[in-house]
Amino acid sequence: MKLTRRILALCLAMLLALCASAPVLADAPTMQSTIMFTHDMHSHFLPATDETGVEYGGYARLKTAINSVKSEHPDAILVDGGDFSMGSLFQTAYAETASELRVMGALGYDAITFGNHEYDYRAVGLASMLNAAVDSGDRLPAIVEANYLPPLPGEAGFNDDAQAVWDAFSRCGVSDYILLERGGIWYAIVGIMGVDSDECAPMSGMILHDRFEKTRRAVDAAKAECWEKNGMQPLVVCLSHSGTDSDGKGEDYELARKVKGIHLIVSGHTHSTLTQPVEVNGTWIVSAGEYSKNLGVVTMGYKPNGDTVLSDYRLIPIDGSFADDPDIAALVDGYKKEVDENYLRRFGLSFDQVLAYNPYTFDSVDEVYATRHDSNLGSLLSDAYKWAVEEATGERVDLALTASGVIRESFAVGDVTVSDVFNAASLGIGADGVPGYPLIAVYLTGADVKNAIEVDASVSELMGAARLYYSGAAAEYNTNRMFFNKTSSAVLIRDGGVREDIDDERLYRVVTGLYCGQMLGAAESSSFGLLTITARDADGAPIDMDRLEDYIVHDERGNEIKEWYAIASYLQSMGGEVEAKYAAPDGRKLVTASWRPDKLLKNPNKFTLVAAAAVLILLALAVFAVRALVRRRKKRAAGRRNGRVRRSLSRF
């Protein structure tokens, strides 16, 4: 009984102390907090040039910009929202030297989180990278990740690779959150992964835990720890690799709506650029664009009770107005030499080697994603895949496909280098452990070939990364047609431009990248299972998708044909200049919007036929109902007339 009274007394004392301190904290002077941020850097150590010739980014320039902000705000912190790797030739040293993480330490990053592309080299690659970073002895940023974790012993999927990641997490200090003090302000920095990010990492080996629950727990734990240790509430920053749409909606919008107590969300994954922050439920959402095009800077007024107010927000373009920081420039140059020696030499190429001169304007990556349309960039890449496999194997390829989701950069007017080509197709790793996704060759029935083309016509409006570009085929889309039957015609294009009808029952040899092949199931699920695409072997038997690597294409020396190398070889074959046929789209994809009945009903598939049948049934029912109503009214009218006649006769 005495113990119970003592506990109650202690709780009452703590409550009184808390209540007494609240006015003090609320009346405390407002301090200024400045947070610099980036996301989706994708190994873009060097400045890049877009398809219009405008140069942007580069880590040596970024460092100069960071130093400039630090001169104004010495206590500013620097954070990143994930996907710091995979996007340039520098990524080829990811697992061995951890150059991305080490250069971010040199840039002065305080905390970062993982994005889906940090798992492109799978669990074992991530573990190797973290261990290499620790072994280097260099300064490293803190890493926060609360909801995307390896399986634990006893959980499904646990294996040696999962344990290796746990061990690497322990060595590198990866945690749900960190507390960081700067200039008298305490920050709680949390890291999370989004749903779409997980879907974009099919071979990560990680488990995606509920992001709302895990974020809520991490925020609450960070606040409790900060209060216990420091007697104040932290400024809560969530590094979220989840994404924000151009209109400010998306997964991070939902995160802010459902989880209270977050002051700032740095929103990565969707490569969004928010020129103004989005406020949701008292939380500010910010994005600065990809590839270090901008350095984001947020300044907030902060009080120790956790109250904040947004004071300033700006995106600083990283361009030629910033000089190179000499230390970072020297570091990057050293990594560049390592790439030449350790990766490119096996292909007989070098970093800045010119493959061809390009006199033409190609689509930007944004344009590739934007709408259903023909694209000279998509045509060039898919043609390269078809050409490379036919050259290596001597076997005809009926169709080659690529998707907008794997096209990372475009080509500017001017010299196209090995680095430029790798940047355009930079994702992944092969079964050989060598960076770069390889090409695969499988078979599809003619019906599934048509379904694949219909994915571009219908599903890509729901999932922009599924816009397809193909070599060896031509199709016409009518955007006003029935959903899942927007393709009015599709044919194969043979040598000499000869058009050949697609036979639904026949098997066709199809080439695409390993990642695109792995994402076939996503197209099926996005179409609610209505558009099936089943990869098959040469005998027509369905392929176990877990064994898709068995269908990687190799050259005569047994080397995997990498996507980027196929493009590089194709450009080299052109004799010094990109061929004139890529000056503009060639009409292999024609998109119209017609309401003409013959255009709407041309080559109907089962969806249009079912819809047409349903419309006819509804029309028949309507006609039946109208006729029944007319008969009923006639019958009632006749009854009324007969009644009047009977009443008239009764008077006599």
Image: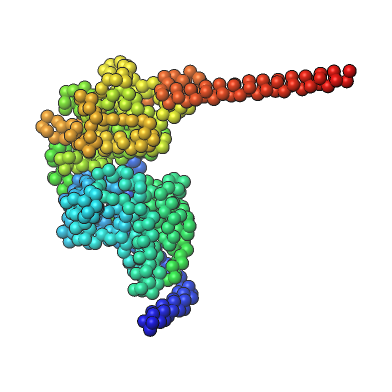
Count of all numbered marks drawn on residues in the image:
0
Front residue of 322/46: it is: 46
Relative image position of residue 386 (x, y in whole percent): 24, 27
Lateral position of residue 129 relative to residue 451, left or right:
left
Lateral position of residue 127 relative to residue 238, left or right:
left
Lateral position of residue 361 relative to residue 393, left or right:
right
At horizontal 40% and vertical 72% (from top left) the residue drawn is 232
- Which residue in the rendered view is the most extreme toward the bottom? 2
Would you identify the image quadrant in which residue 314 lies?
A: bottom left
At horizontal 31% and vertical 57% (from top left) the residue drawn is 146
Front residue of 462/543: it is: 543
Pick the quarter of the image with the C terminus. Answer: top right
Front residue of 342/172: it is: 172
Pick the quarter of the image with the N terminus. Answer: bottom left
Would you identify the image quadrant in which residue 432 lies?
A: top left
Relative image position of residue 555 (x, y in whole percent): 14, 31
Image height of 329 relative to 520, above or below:
below
- Which residue in the rendered view is the most extreme toward the right? 652
Front residue of 286/529: it is: 529
Query: Is residue 454 shown to the viewer in this render?
Result: yes
Relative image position of residue 556 (x, y in whole percent): 12, 29
Relative image position of residue 87 (x, y in whole percent): 27, 44
At horizontal 13% and vertical 45% (from top left) the residue drawn is 341
At horizontal 63% and vertical 22% (from top left) the residue drawn is 628
Image height of 497 relative to 352, above or below:
above
Image height of 463 relative to 394, above or below:
below
Colour scheme of this structure image?
rainbow
Image height of 185 relative to 256, above or below:
below
Query: Is residue 94 shown to the viewer in this render?
Result: no
